[in-house]
């Protein structure tokens, strides 16, 4: 173990000159302009306009109005000294119904974004899918329809043709775990289905879309970019005093199969784990996996994106006491854990962010080291890490002391992982801007830049100033 303070509050740690410091956003959360320039409806438009789905009935119709404030937001990024910017492309802005001839106005917007980044010396990291599936495709089955994976490949081809000479890194999918299990299993995310078999079907077709999308991108890219996928891999811990060692191991194994190996298995090993298939046999027979699918999914990638916020603690449920389900996700009635409803998620020690998630920088170090040991030789990048706190502008300033402390501790964790041999290429702080936080609407603020949603005024928080100092000095500030 690397030396350092036990609470991860180190200062003065230096990052190498080629380490890439950036920030991240997602299209539906910031763009607004939901009905402009040929953009069609996405599943999140439909979901957010459905009564009872989003806190306060909020929608992403206007969000941060980034679509109209592109130049000033780009200047803001440059002022922070960002070396990279991870953004996502809205599929319904490119193809209103998910198929057909691409919308030139949509492509032009992202062309201006990429050009603006390059003009400011900022590396464009483009994510093709951050959850905003065209509603027309959902009407035909969405991610439970195999054809959606092929439509995704067509979409990737069109975007790659338009931007394939300028984007530095392509990411196919962001957090397919959320798309599949929260969208089709628990009902907490769009499209709001609550069916375990649908969730597992979506897992496979999202994985297939990843593979087909990479093939499509490689066919048209012209500037030798890097290729990646981003996973929100779960850091799973067992209860401290389990009923038995076997039960502790079983609970961790089951959730690891569903949350992690359902994606790393086919993407990085070319196969689904046998125990995952066995665990979920009562939910589905996995007949949707066709011969040759896993070979298609296992396309070579240059970087694995890692999103990390908190840990989970699990144990096997005794079947009689009230089942504890503190898994950190909004409860809408369904389960994001098909086939493992007899696993409990225990409350964890604080402190917590405004999302109720525990703050555990050691979990990030453990995750990065574990991935390095599982997949030696595969470079990693932290593609999201950050925290929500109830920030306020007082006398023109946002004193977000808790976020500064959070980032300091997690950058320390990343540095320690690198000291232990992890090939970590960069870190994209979530999020650049306060934004539409999915089912929580505008009630949770993740940004290092405060957004007044009535006036759209941007205010740099203390965390943004702290991050600018880290980037310029390449050293964790005091």
Image: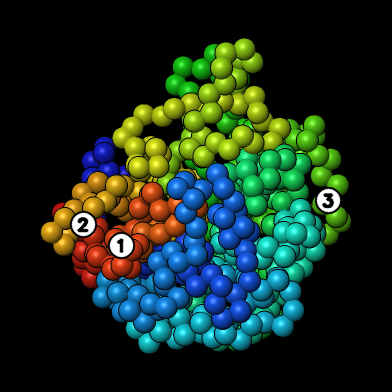
- Residue drawn where x is 36% and y is 82% of the image: 71
Q: Mark 2 and mark 1 in contact (Cβ < 8 Å)? A: yes
Is 340 placed above or below 226 here? above
Q: Quadrant of residue 361?
A: top left
Q: Considering depth in this image, is 309 or 377 the residue closer to the camera?
A: 309
Instruction: Inspect this view and state whether residue 384 appears.
Output: no
Q: Secondary structure at mark 3?
A: loop
Q: Residue 220, position in %: x, y? A: 66, 83
Residue 301 is left or right of residue 371, and the answer is right
Q: Mark 3 and mark 2 in contact (Cβ < 8 Å)? A: no
In this rendering, the label closer to the viewer, 2 or 3: 2
Q: Which residue is mark 2?
A: 393
Residue 264 is left or right of residue 359, and the answer is right
- Residue drawn where x is 48% and y is 37% of the image: 328
Label disc, if present, on residue 452 of the rendered structure: 1
Instruction: Inspect this view and state whether residue 169 appears.
Output: yes
Q: Secondary structure at mark 2?
A: loop
Q: Marks 1 and 2, Cα distance to the nearest angstrom?
A: 9 Å
Q: Residue 478, position in %: x, y? A: 16, 54
Is 367 placed above or below 158 here? above
Q: Marks 3 and 1, Cα distance to the nearest angstrom?
A: 46 Å
């Amino acid at each position: 173990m690397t030396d350092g303070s036990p609470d991860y509050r180190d200062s003065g740690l230096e990052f190498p000159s080629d380490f890439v410091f950036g920030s991240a956003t997602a299209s539906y959360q910031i763009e607004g302009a939901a009905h402009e320039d040929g953009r069609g409806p996405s599943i999140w438009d439909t979901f957010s306009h459905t009564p009872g789905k989003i806190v306060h009935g909020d929608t992403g119709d206007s969000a941060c109005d980034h679509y109209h404030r592109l130049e000033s937001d780009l200047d803001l990024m440059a002022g922070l000294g960002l070396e990279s910017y991870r953004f996502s492309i809205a599929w319904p802005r490119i193809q209103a119904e998910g198929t057909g001839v691409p919308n030139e106005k949509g492509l032009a917007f992202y062309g201006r974004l990429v050009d603006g980044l390059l003009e400011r010396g900022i590396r464009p990291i483009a994510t093709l899918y951050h959850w905003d599936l065209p509603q027309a495709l959902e009407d035909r089955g969405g991610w439970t329809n195999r054809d959606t994976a092929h439509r995704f490949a067509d979409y990737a081809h069109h975007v790659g043709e338009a931007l394939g000479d300028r984007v530095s890194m392509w990411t196919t999918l962001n957090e397919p775990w959320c798309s599949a299990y929260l969208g089709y299993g628990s009902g907490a995310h769009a499209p709001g289905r609550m069916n375990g078999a649908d969730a597992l079907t979506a897992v496979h077709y999202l994985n297939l879309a990843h593979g087909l999308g990479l093939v499509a991108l490689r066919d048209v890219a012209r500037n030798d970019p890097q290729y990646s996928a981003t996973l929100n891999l779960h850091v799973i811990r067992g209860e401290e005093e389990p009923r038995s060692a076997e039960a502790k191991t079983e609970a961790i194994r089951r959730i690891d199969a569903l949350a992690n190996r359902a994606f790393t298995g086919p993407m990085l090993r070319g196969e689904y784990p046998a125990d995952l298939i066995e665990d979920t046999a009562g939910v589905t027979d996995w007949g949707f996996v066709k011969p040759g699918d896993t070979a298609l999914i296992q396309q070579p990638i240059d970087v694995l994106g890692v999103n990390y916020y908190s840990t989970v603690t699990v144990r096997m449920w005794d079947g009689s006491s009230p089942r504890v389900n503190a898994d950190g996700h909004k409860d809408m009635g369904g389960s994001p854990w098909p086939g493992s409803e007899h696993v409990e998620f225990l409350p964890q020690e604080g402190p917590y962010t405004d999302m109720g998630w525990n703050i555990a920088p050691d979990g990030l170090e453990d995750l990065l080291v574990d991935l390095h040991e599982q997949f030696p030789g595969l470079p990693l990048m932290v593609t999201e890490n950050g925290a929500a706190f109830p920030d306020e502008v007082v006398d023109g300033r946002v004193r977000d002391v808790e976020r500064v402390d959070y980032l300091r501790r997690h950058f320390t964790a990343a540095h320690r992982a690198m000291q232990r041999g992890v090939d970590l290429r960069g870190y994209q702080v979530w999020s650049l801007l306060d934004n539409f936080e999915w089912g929580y609407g505008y009630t949770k603020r993740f940004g290092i830049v405060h957004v007044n949603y009535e006036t759209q005024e941007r205010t740099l928080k203390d965390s943004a100033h702290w991050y600018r100092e880290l980037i310029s000095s390449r050293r964790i500030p005091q």
